């Protein structure tokens, strides 16, 4: 089916993440027809994915349906599907929706498909160290974390029990720091009184990074403070340590300390790297644009592809000025693309380069503790956490989600609870043998955890 | 590992559903050591599973961890695992926790493993018509329902689009009635303004039952009222119609009307029958007890197995006096078993038969409408709904869940929202081709939807 027949300027946006959604909203009053295409039916508030993985939030809290967010914006069509091809000459994209193929024509195209997990050439690690990019990843990680304590409880021998009680997070960027902090907190606080055979507070939480310091994008003083806070919460941090192998029972590293060369650990979480979505290579092939090592598409200063002023690439899919892969870059570059389209429609075709305005960045350590840069301010501890709380509530999409998230935060931060601890049988822990489905389990095992998102 | 070494009376409870949990709680002050074993880590509030399947509630709302519920009850051990064997002579059960095998000794044993979906000898129907017994089932059904509207939106041809917009619920008991009512409501209310190519309100919702009337356990006047209310909500009800075939694109029936012989429908939900968990046959084989046609274990009037006064069978696993398979029977028979154990420990070994006290039953039709019997009262419409609201909030386990559910109900009943509409890639709709995992997808396809619960 082809969305044609309209004489209005047609804008196609691929991806309903921070970038895509910002572009669509910025086109709210423009005289255009917008089609936004995503592989999943929801917008994902990725900065809180770690809270879903550790049992604080549900998928609905951080993943509202794109259609619902945009239902009042009459100039938008939402389409579920994967973009499998771009014809930059005929100006159309090919879309596959569970086998149902469509062709969607565009006058302007905004590619905002985001990034996916990268295992730096070791995709086989994904089996034992799932990533943290989609709600499926978060459900998987949740099942593994809470399942590990269950396994420890029924494991009598010391060494295998300790392997169930060891959690390794690979990558000390914001996601890794937040994951490690939450695992420490849930083992020390939330699971109190829950077990009879083990002491969950004895869980070992290890955070590794190949770089010599944590929280790369942060000023060094704040990163140091975060490391200190995490250590006091019981997280063991080793920097400058590369992971050389991952298997079901542990990881291997290149650490100089012998005790770190092999860490027996049943639960591993990969938060170490990202690569552009496959759409980057598709678009590059269609336009002759270059890509960088992470698969991001090289663009002109105004975020368009050279020779194709009607194709914009924004956010994590865009290679420009070594901008960081954060939501703010995606939102600002997407709004820049939308503004350029609007200006052109008004007859103003001057090129304006995209300029990123760094508004700050933040990461939580535990309840009541975070590090944050907000404009010129550098905050840590409780003030940092208040800034984090305010900004995240402000940016969450929709009043309903804010209300639901607040209730869950009250339960988790003021109480001791984790409202979302149910392990579904679809998660790997249960798949191994609690279901009567070993074939499906092993087949799913071979799927890289990072393969199922394109658009974010 | 073996839980021995204690000199106190050991009670093992298999299943953490309404029955098992009631037995454990009733033993709170008894001088016993209790071990409760379940295949999943949560207690499931099954009467609200249909709300999870239709996007109102999250899994955490209705499936709190067993450990968390029981953390303050010091005489209880919670153990995750599947009971694979019973040795009624040595008085021990064999447990498998993801390959980790344990043997647990008992002095008294309470079997409360509940029921699972039954396809009346047609397990192959499960592939295309998932059941409604576990949180995995509900996630599956949720993904199929919301996915069907997505597929309809990108399907240009009329007949296949209508098949995506047709939803067939098989079984007009309380679960089937509630599912059909909710699908009608979400298509007519919640999805308003969400689509541009289709009108979700045009969805056809069909409710079928082989019996000549709906809501078997209810008085006929209330069942008639429910049928009337459902019809006015847009549900098409056909009674006395048996399903003879289920495939990906529709169902076949034995209806006399030719138009009902074949109903093209992409989404089918099976709410037609239950059978006892496999533990029923295991226990019967170990004790020589008989089972009925649904696999339930025949028991003495006091809920024990003949010749084994220390083995109790309760709830849906028990065959006694044709009692209905409802939560109240499970809770009352479990409390009866716990009380018997308590009396015996006090030296009183008189047998007392279990007597079920029918407190009533209820089913919602849509927001603000329900049918209910409460003692001698027969309620319908808004009064019935208020009774439903009160009873369900009262019986939900834990204050936190009540608070979270209330928030979601406000959003869904007063607003128009469905907070939980995110389709995970693990659900069948996305599995078909949105993931790069056809092997896993097809392998899971062959798994009967009902195979992954034993204890409920």
Image: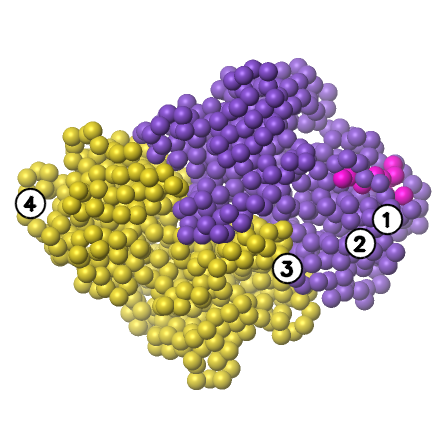
Chain colours: A yellow, B purple
- Give the labeled residue for mark 4: A349
Callout 2: chain: B
B140 within the magenta span: no
- Give the labeled residue for mark 1: B287
Q: Which residues are magenta?
A: B295-306
- Give the labeled residue for mark 2: B86
Tell me the distance, in whole angstroms, between the alpha carbons under discs 3 and 4. Answer: 63 Å
Crowding near pointer 3: few (<14 within 10 Å), some, many (20+)? some
**Residue B152 place in picture, x, y as percent:** 39, 32
Residue B220 image-quadrant placement: top right
Tell me the distance, in whole angstroms, between the alpha carbons under discs 2 and 1. Answer: 9 Å
Tell me the distance, in whole angstroms, between the alpha carbons under discs 1 and 3. Answer: 27 Å
Q: Which mark is residue B98?
A: 3
Total number of numbered discs in the rendering? 4
Quarter containing the N terminus of chain A = top left
- Which-is-in-front pick, marks 3 and 4? 3
Mark 1–mark 3 CB contact (< 8 Å): no
B300 within the magenta span: yes
Mark 3–mark 4 CB contact (< 8 Å): no
Question: For the residue labelled by badge 3, is the local secondary structure a helix, a strand or a loop?
Answer: loop
Question: For the residue labelled by badge 1, is the local secondary structure a helix, a strand or a loop?
Answer: helix
Query: Measuring 43% from the left and 59% from the top, which residue is drawn there?
Result: A448
Task: Compare marks 2 and 3 and give the one earlier in the sequence.
Answer: 2
Mark 2–mark 1 CB contact (< 8 Å): yes
- Which-is-in-front pick, marks 4 and 2? 2
- Which-is-in-front pick, marks 1 and 4? 1
């Amino acid at each position: 089916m082809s969305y044609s027949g309209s004489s209005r300027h047609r804008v196609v946006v691929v991806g309903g993440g921070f970038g895509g959604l910002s572009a669509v909203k910025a086109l709210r009053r423009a005289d255009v027809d917008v089609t936004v295409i995503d592989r999943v039916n929801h917008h994902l508030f990725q900065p809180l994915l770690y809270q879903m993985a550790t049992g604080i939030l549900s998928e609905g809290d951080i993943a509202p349906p794109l259609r619902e967010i945009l239902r009042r914006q009459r100039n938008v069509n939402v389409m579920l599907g994967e973009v499998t091809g771009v014809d930059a000459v005929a100006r159309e994209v090919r879309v596959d929706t569970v086998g149902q193929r469509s062709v969607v024509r565009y006058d302007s195209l905004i590619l905002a498909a985001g990034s996916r997990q990268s295992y730096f050439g070791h995709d086989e690690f994904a089996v034992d160290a799932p990533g943290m990019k989609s709600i499926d990843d978060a459900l998987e990680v949740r099942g593994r974390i809470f399942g590990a304590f269950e396994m420890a409880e029924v494991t009598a021998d010391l060494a295998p029990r300790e392997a169930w009680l060891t959690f390794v997070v690979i990558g000390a960027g914001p996601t890794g720091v937040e994951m490690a902090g939450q695992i420490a907190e849930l083992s020390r606080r939330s699971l109190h009184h829950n077990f009879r055979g083990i002491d969950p507070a004895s869980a070992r939480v290890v955070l590794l990074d190949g770089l010599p310091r944590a929280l790369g994008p942060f000023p060094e003083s704040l990163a140091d403070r975060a490391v200190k806070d995490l250590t006091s919460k019981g997280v063991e941090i080793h920097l400058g340590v590369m992971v050389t192998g991952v298997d079901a029972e542990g990881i291997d590293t290149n650490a100089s300390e012998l005790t770190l060369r092999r860490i027996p650990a049943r639960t591993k979480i990969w938060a170490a790297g990202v690569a552009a979505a496959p759409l980057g290579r598709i678009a590059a092939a269609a336009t002759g644009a270059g890509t960088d090592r992470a698969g991001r598409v090289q663009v002109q200063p105004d975020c368009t592809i050279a020779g194709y002023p009607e194709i914009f690439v924004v956010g994590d899919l865009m290679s420009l000025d070594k901008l960081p892969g954060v939501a703010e870059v995606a939102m600002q570059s997407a709004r820049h693309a939308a503004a350029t389209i609007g200006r052109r429609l008004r007859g103003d075709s001057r090129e304006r380069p995209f300029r990123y305005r760094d508004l700050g960045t933040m990461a939580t350590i535990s309840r009541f503790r975070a590090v944050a840069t907000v404009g010129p301010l550098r905050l840590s501890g409780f003030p940092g956490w208040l800034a984090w709380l305010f900004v995240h509530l402000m940016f969450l999409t929709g009043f309903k989600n804010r209300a639901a998230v607040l209730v869950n935060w009250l339960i988790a931060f003021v109480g001791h609870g984790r409202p979302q601890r149910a392990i579904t049988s679809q998660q790997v822990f249960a798949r191994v043998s609690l279901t009567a489905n070993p074939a499906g389990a092993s087949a799913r095992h071979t799927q890289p955890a990072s393969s199922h998102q394109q658009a974010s």
